[in-house]
Amino acid sequence: MKFLSLLVLMLSLVSYSQNSMDQDIIDIEDQLIEWRHHFHQNPELSNREFKTAEKIAEHLKSLGMEVETGIAKTGVVGILKGNNNGKVVALRADIDALPVTERNDLPFKSEVRTTFLNTETGVMHACGHDTHIAILMATAEVLSKHKDKINGTVKFIFQPAEEGPPPGEEGGAKLMIKENVLKNPDVDAIFGLHINSQTPVGTIKYKTGGIMASVERFVIDVKGKQTHGSQPWSGVDPILISAKIIDGLQTIISRESQLTNEAAVITVGKITAGTRFNIIPESAEMIGTVRTLDPAMRSHIEKRMKEMVETIAKAYGGNATITFQNNTSITFNDPDLTAQVLPSIQRAAGETNVQIMKATTGGEDFSYFQEEVPGVYFFLGGMTPGTTESFPHHTPDFMIDDSGMLLGVKAFTNITLDYLNN
């Protein structure tokens, strides 16, 4: 009888503890939205997130955390130690905005202007990073109130320059890793999320393995021989060679890549050549991107691009070289870790609201963290249910429904506690 009474008491304490945390999550929603609106109205570009970082650091310090600033220029890390020893889990949010002029009538619309690459432009959180900051700040506050439930340590990583650092600068996840953000204490697993304007509020989407593509930027320099446009036989036309190269590169995708396994894309987005209509120029430059979701396909495509560029140019009397710059690796969700935390995500959203998605050819530098430690990245719904039109990320009309953010806090909280206490 005494044992039964003790068991009932223990179960009631666990239930009270869980109810207490659930209530803390509900209670923080107003503050969560307020934070998001503040960051949306005050966006800052990559490696220039000074005021954003100050506000984040101030909040983490108010929670009694160990806080480090200036990581990868403007990054902030908060460390929350639980009452008991255990593993170390990292939660990450990106904090930078984009050079996009906002075009909507939100009461917290961004009016910020700046000069980016010698062009005057607006600045906007056109990818939802403002929501990511607010979600992680709220998660930090909730977990800081329940250190007794944490067996281990939580690292809150607020990362700058996810959209890429300015030309000539380092930044983003790569620089954070270089500056040992995953060390002292050493991280065992890392988790991240991305709000999505075209996924309904209340929904979470995930995929085991490659969920987002590696992103390579390539530059092709074509050399020909300049001549008068009226007598092309006396020169070598680099524009013609460029056209043949573009045509050839697409056959690598359509005829050499097993697209039934994973998607792949080669896009030439910019061509520069010539000064006048009647002059065949001496050179041409092409700039583009390669997107892949499979490491073997990535290696094959880059190898064949190099071979094809050089060979096609030579066949038409010119020469050409190609150089690659890696922007992100494959965002790869560790299969075992994904299976482990899936029940935590399902408990947060409801099993029917957690859906398997197809991979996207967008890129994420969260992938660099996943190359160092096991990680899981998932998508959080931010579209108002019943909406007939939603605008893509990186556009002036991009919008997110505030009501979608609280699920992100629930998911992060569940994942963290279940992982550390399992």
Image (cartoon, helix red, strand yellow):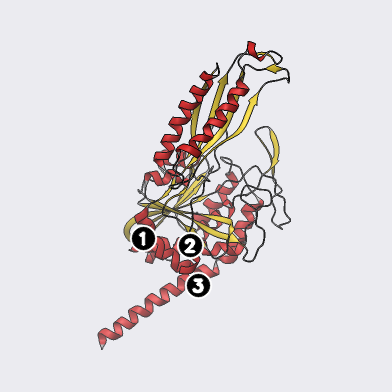
**Residue located at (62% from left, 32% from top):** 270
Amino acid type, callout 3:
Gln
In the depicted structure, whether residue 15 falls above or below residue 356: below
Viewer-side label of 2, 3:
2
Say which residue label 1 marks. 340
User: Of callouts 2 and 3, which one flags the residue occurring earlier in the amino acid sequence?
Assistant: 3
State yes or no: discs 3 and 1 in contact (Cβ < 8 Å): no
User: Of callouts 3 and 1, which one flags the residue occurring earlier in the amino acid sequence?
Assistant: 3
* 391, 77: nearer the viewer: 391
Amino acid type, callout 2:
Gln
Task: Find residue 96 and report its horizontal and vertical position in percent.
Answer: 57, 46
> Which type of secondary structure does the marked residue at label 3 adopt?
helix
Question: Does residue 369 appear left or right of residue 313 in this picture?
Answer: left
* 43, 105: nearer the viewer: 105
Say which residue label 3 marks. 23
**Residue located at (67% from left, 21% from top):** 274
Task: Find residue 50 and report its horizontal and vertical position in percent.
Answer: 58, 44
Amino acid type, callout 1:
Gln
